[in-house]
Image (spheres, rainbow, N blue to C red):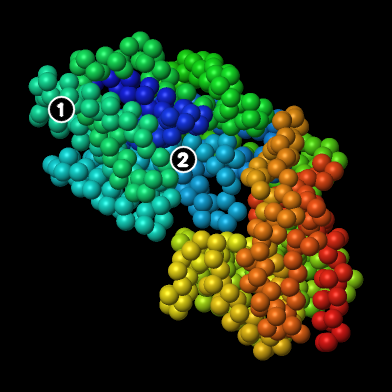
Amino acid sequence: MTAHFRNEIAGLRAIAVIGVVLFHLKVVAFQGGFVGVDVFFVISGYLITRNILRDLDTDRFSFGGFYVRRTRRILPALIFTVALTYLLGALWCSPLMFLDLAKECTHALLSIANIQYWRESHQYFAPNSDELALLHFWSLSLEEQFYLIWPLFIVLATKMGRPYQAIAAAAILSLLGAIGVSKTDPLAAFFLMPFRIFEFAAGALVLPLEVRFRPAKAIAEALSAGGILCIVASMLLLDSDMPHLEAIVLAPCLGAAATIWAGERTLASKIITNPVMVALGAISYSLYLCHWPIIFFARFIFGGIADTLSGMVATTTCMLVVAVPMYAFVERRFIQSSPPPKGGSLKYAAGLASVILGFAAVTHLTFLSRGFAWRLPAVQSEQVHLQSFPANADIVSPSTRIGVEFIGDSLVLEYEYGLRSIMQQLRIGFRSAGGSGCPIFDHAAPSRSARRDECIEARDGALQQIETTDTPIIYAELWRLYDDASIDYDDGTAQSIPSLKGAFKKLQLALEATIEKAVTRGHRVLLLGAQIDPGCFINVPRLEQGPLPHVPQPPCPVTTRDAAERAVAPIDRVLESIGAKWPDRVTVLRPLDYFCDSECPVVINGLWLYNSRIHLSLAGTDYMMRRSEDVFRRFLADGEARR
């Protein structure tokens, strides 16, 4: 099992990195270019397993030697990329954005980026992928986790005399696990290493085929042509939103394995072994590392021009300008340098760990210090703050005497912040119950959400609070999230109601039951109606300038009051019918009546009134409260008078 340079593997690396780059550049024809990562996993599985088995055959394998070689191959260029990204963030990012970028840097350095992105994907306030400067590091962290366990697995399987049978079993278990977990948590199947082992194993299982079944020339030609065609077709035809993707990506994985098995002497392999492709394959790791931060900052700094043809050409050129010297002076320098002397692996590991942990300490300190806000002048910092979403520091109960309860999802945070001065004047405090992204009404739960159990727990806690007090309630939900297609009843009732988008029969029945319990208990209720949709995606990092300027986000299209009325009408009819049932106990406040004149503003005096498509910023909350203050003041003051 001798090792030599394989041109067709270099060509496969080139195809993989080209696919990933075109996918991230959003080139329409390559919406499946993400499978380039799967091809990389297959190549890694083949090469790593080959090298381990070769060293075991010659009695030269050592865990220390293996990990030293891997860290030399992977970590120097990785650390260099993280350092450059951190530096660019310090120059261009606002404190809030730099805080998130620093957190990404820490996770990338500690090789846990994939785990962290998976965990954060379940959070209601999970960032959009376009807001993550090191998102592509999920695959590198996953691969490093694979390298951590795979040598031990191969050594044990070899001692048992069944290495390839063990690899096949691991592949089957991994694939079945990925298919199973994707039904409840598809992002776990995407991000977590155990559910990707079958891809590495697809490459490893080429090894016994090479030894035992050397394909005839005609078969090799078919394998090579079919494999390359399968990879390219997957890049052109697949889509990241397709169902059962964890099984579908078997196609490009098997295509890569078939191409490796066929070898480099086929006619088809000559297509991918020309000098340009081999050169791209050589720099593929450096190119993969730098491509996404360059795309990210190009879009962030220059805006929409980065996605034009000329912008894409400039961005791609920049990638090559960075990747080539990075490969020559960082990646190759450490690969080709002499290995540590015998017994020096521990000293090498200690030195490398000190570099990684020292840098991680700096990035974590940046996170803890809230992104080094001192980088901005006070006026700019205040503008950044006003365009943010209420944080814990913005929301403090003015008194320990509870005068109002907030019930609902994350929208209650806006009103807890907005009503702070009125509550302070009335000398009352508040208590809140509910959960972000959760329908807080009787028996209702999100029908398709990894957070279903969390929402049920939040709902039950809020309903218990309603039944044990008689304090006035302000009820705020993003009602449009909870249509008949998005919620169901956890007690099995209302199964006869069709699951239709844009219909709210389930919501009406559940909310009526909840309000009935509240008014029976003695609560007065202020139901806050549908919040106005600004009509476009709000890219929060683009709203806030850093030390160096970037092109701001263009304003959203104007929404007229008439259009907003039509959009919120289905929700308003539900809430008004409930208010009509208990007119002396339930008041309905429509935000539209206060937020909109002839048009519904999104930006006023340079300040964005929205922090996202579903949340007002501090500036937007202040704008809303100034215009509706009398209604809230009467509701709270009346509650105090009755007590």
**Residue 246 horizontal/vertical position (percent):** 34, 46
339 over 239 or under it: above or below: above
Q: Quadrant of the C terminus?
A: bottom right
Q: How crowded is mark 2: few (under 14 residues within 10 Å), some or many (20 or more)?
A: many
Q: In which quarter of the image is the N terminus?
A: top left
Tell me, for residue 138, which label it has, or none: 2
Give the Cα distance between marks 1 and 2: 31 Å
**Residue 283 horizontal/vertical position (percent):** 43, 19
377 over 485 or under it: above or below: above
Tell me, for residue 210, which label it has, or none: 1
Q: Residue 274 vs residue 263: left or right?
A: right
Query: Between residues 223 and 488, which one lies in front from this camera angle?
Result: 488
Q: Residue 489 vs residue 13: left or right?
A: right
Does the image show residue 60? no
Query: Between residues 79 and 527, which one lies in front from this camera angle?
Result: 527
Which residue is located at x 61 percent, y 26 percent?
306
In the picture, residue 139 is in which quadrant?
Answer: top left
Q: Which amino acid does label 1 sit on?
A: Glu
154 over 123 or under it: above or below: above
Query: Between residues 368 and 350, which one lies in front from this camera angle?
Result: 368
Q: In the displayed image of the protein, which residue is found farthest to the top?
A: 275
- For marks 1 and 2, the one nearer the N-term is 2
The secondary structure type at the circle numbered 1 is: helix
**Residue 91 horizontal/vertical position (percent):** 71, 30
The secondary structure type at the circle numbered 2 is: helix
In the picture, residue 544 is in which quadrant?
Answer: top right
Q: What residue type is labelled 2?
A: Trp
**Residue 268 horizontal/vertical position (percent):** 24, 18
Which residue is located at x 51 percent, y 67 percent?
484
Which residue is located at x 57 percent, y 36 percent?
133
Which residue is located at x 33 percent, y 20 percent?
10
